Every structure is written in structure tokens, then in C-alpha cells.
Image (spheres, rainbow, N blue to C red):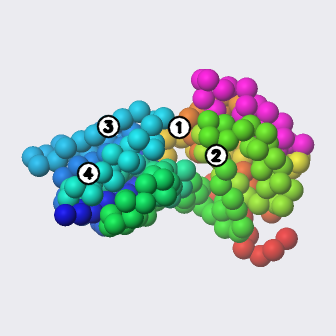
């Protein structure tokens, strides 16, 4: 008997931003699988088994979830934000591609609110026109590709949102990213560092690229860079919807 596999986004941090659809899936689950801090956000209860695991075993985690669902369990794979944005939905479908027997599993992706969108809402509307999201980590792609995408996005005048900007293992790369942005966009472009969005540690800092330093970001920070039309209105930052 085949169960069901939900791939759910837990939002950026505030429990109020977890969707009712995700809350219901978690209430009906027999098993919850995910990265350790995300599983920790799910309250234990009778009849529920929690399966926390390390962040670098995504395919193993996805395969385990599919095996449980195939055996009849009601499984929820949890990610922060939205599961389709730099998260577990892709890993689950990659596991299905590798093992066609998993195609019989009923898989449903439940959207969530990303840190990028939560940060933009707090700021005003910095992503109000065309924008792109780039993961600055080179764990799953070469740094040369990150650099190329940064340059092309800046030259296309996208507003940009950056995930995983700076970690202890690669502190130098965000400095290089800022140098690229200053070279392509100039020193006056607005950049916002949004840390721990919607949590009690939430903090925002909007400066120009000329004022930005690498130390303003860490792995809990989403960085939003405006396009050439992005500007401040009082305490808000917005990007006009009209083309420039």
C-alpha cells in the first residue's frame, strides 16, 4: 500500500507564517524528515516519528522519505521557506528520477513563504519589478558559475536576492561578490541585509554598495540588492513597476 509524501515549506521562522495546508499535513503525518533545525520546529506527539539529519545528505533524506511513503506512511519532508526554492523538492524528484519505482508514490509539494519574500515585505517592495534569486554557496556549483550569474543579473538590471551569502568556511567569497556588484552597478545601488527574518533576532540594515562590507552578512542573512530604479521612500525601500 502506498502512502503519501508531502514536501512542505515551514516559512522563514514565525509560526504564524506556516500555511494552514502545511499545518494540516503535519497534523496527519506519521513521519517528518528534514535538516536538524527544521525538524526541531515540529512539535513531537504520539504517533509521529521525527527523522532529523545533516544538511549534506539531501538525496539520502529524499530516498528515505520515498521508501517510507511507498510502504504506506504519511510522510512530510520539511524545508524552511518554500520547498522549491533552494530546498528539498528538487532532491525528492531527483531521487524519483534515479529510481523509477518511486514514481508510484503520491507526491504533493506544499508552498511556503520564503525568507526572500518575507524580507521584501518588511522592507516595502524592493522586488516590485523583475528580479532573480541566486544562492551564493558554491557547495553544489562552481564559484565561477556564481560569479558569471552575478555579472549577468547585474548587467540585466535585475533586483537580486541572495541566499547563503557568507559562511565561516568561505568568508572571502562574499567580498568578491560585493566587488563584482560595485563594478557592475556602481557604489550608489541600495543593498539590504535582512537577518533572521520574522524571528526575535530579526535585524535589517539598508546601505549603498559603497558602504557595504562582507561582515554585514552571515548564513542567516538574506541580501537584497535593488535595480537602478530602486529607492527609499521614508523608512521603506521600493522598486517601481514601470520599466526604466
Q: Earlier in the sequence, mark 4 or mark 2?
A: 4
Q: Earlier in the sequence, mark 3 or mark 2?
A: 3
Mark 3 or mark 2, whichever is nearer to me? 3
Q: Are marks 4 and 2 in contact (CB under 8 Å)?
A: no
The residue labelled by disc 3 is 52
Q: Start and end of the magenta stretch?
A: 165-183
Residue 230 image point, x, y percent:
76, 60
Asked if residue 111 can be seen in this view, the reply is yes
Q: Disc 3 to disc 4, how far (Cα)? A: 15 Å
Q: Earlier in the sequence, mark 3 or mark 4?
A: 3
Mark 4 or mark 2, whichever is nearer to me? 4
Mark 4 residue element: helix
Q: At x 20% / y 59%, what residue is drawn?
A: 72
Residue 41 image point, x, y percent:
30, 43
The residue labelled by disc 2 is 135
Q: Disc 3 to disc 2, how far (Cα)? A: 23 Å
Q: Which residue is at the far bottom?
A: 242
Q: At x 67% / y 67%, what residue is drawn?
A: 128
Q: Disc 2 to disc 1, how far (Cα)? A: 13 Å
The residue labelled by disc 4 is 68
* Along the line of sight, the residue nearer the viewer: 119 or 39: 39
Other-residue count near label 1 (Cα within 10 Å), few / some / many at <14 / 14–19 / ≥20: some
* Along the line of sight, the residue nearer the viewer: 161 or 136: 136
* Along the line of sight, the residue nearer the viewer: 72 or 215: 72
The residue labelled by disc 1 is 220
Q: Disc 4 to disc 1, how far (Cα)? A: 31 Å
Q: At x 33% / y 53%, what residue is drawn?
A: 66
Residue 195 in magenta stretch = no
Amino acid at each position: 500500500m502506498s502512502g503519501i509524501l508531502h514536501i512542505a515549506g515551514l516559512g522563514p521562522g514565525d509560526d504564524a507564517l506556516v500555511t494552514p495546508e502545511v499545518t494540516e499535513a503535519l497534523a496527519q503525518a506519521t513521519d517528518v524528515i528534514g535538516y536538524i533545525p527544521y525538524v526541531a520546529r515540529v512539535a513531537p506527539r504520539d504517533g509521529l516519528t521525527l527523522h532529523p539529519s545533516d544538511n549534506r545528505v539531501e538525496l539520502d533524506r529524499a530516498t528515505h522519505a520515498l521508501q517510507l511513503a511507498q510502504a504506506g506512511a504519511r510522510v512530510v519532508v520539511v524545508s524552511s521557506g518554500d520547498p522549491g526554492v533552494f530546498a528539498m523538492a528538487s532532491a525528492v524528484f531527483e531521487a524519483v528520477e534515479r529510481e523509477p519505482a518511486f514514481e508510484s508514490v503520491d507526491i504533493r509539494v506544499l508552498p511556503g513563504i520564503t525568507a526572500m519574500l518575507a524580507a521584501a515585505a518588511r522592507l516595502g517592495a524592493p522586488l516590485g519589478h523583475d528580479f532573480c534569486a541566486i544562492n551564493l554557496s558554491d557547495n553544489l556549483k562552481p564559484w565561477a558559475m556564481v560569479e558569471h550569474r552575478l555579472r549577468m543579473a547585474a548587467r540585466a538590471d535585475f533586483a537580486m536576492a541572495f541566499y547563503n551569502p557568507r559562511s565561516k568556511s568561505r568568508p572571502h567569497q562574499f567580498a568578491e561578490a560585493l566587488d563584482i556588484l560595485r563594478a557592475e552597478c556602481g557604489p550608489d545601488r541600495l543593498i539590504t541585509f535582512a537577518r533572521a527574518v520574522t524571528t526575535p533576532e530579526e535585524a535589517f540594515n539598508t546601505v549603498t554598495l559603497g558602504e557595504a562590507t562582507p561582515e554585514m552578512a552571515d548564513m542567516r542573512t538574506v541580501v537584497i540588492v535593488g535595480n537602478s530604479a530602486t529607492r527609499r521612500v521614508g523608512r521603506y525601500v521600493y522598486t517601481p513597476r514601470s520599466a526604466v
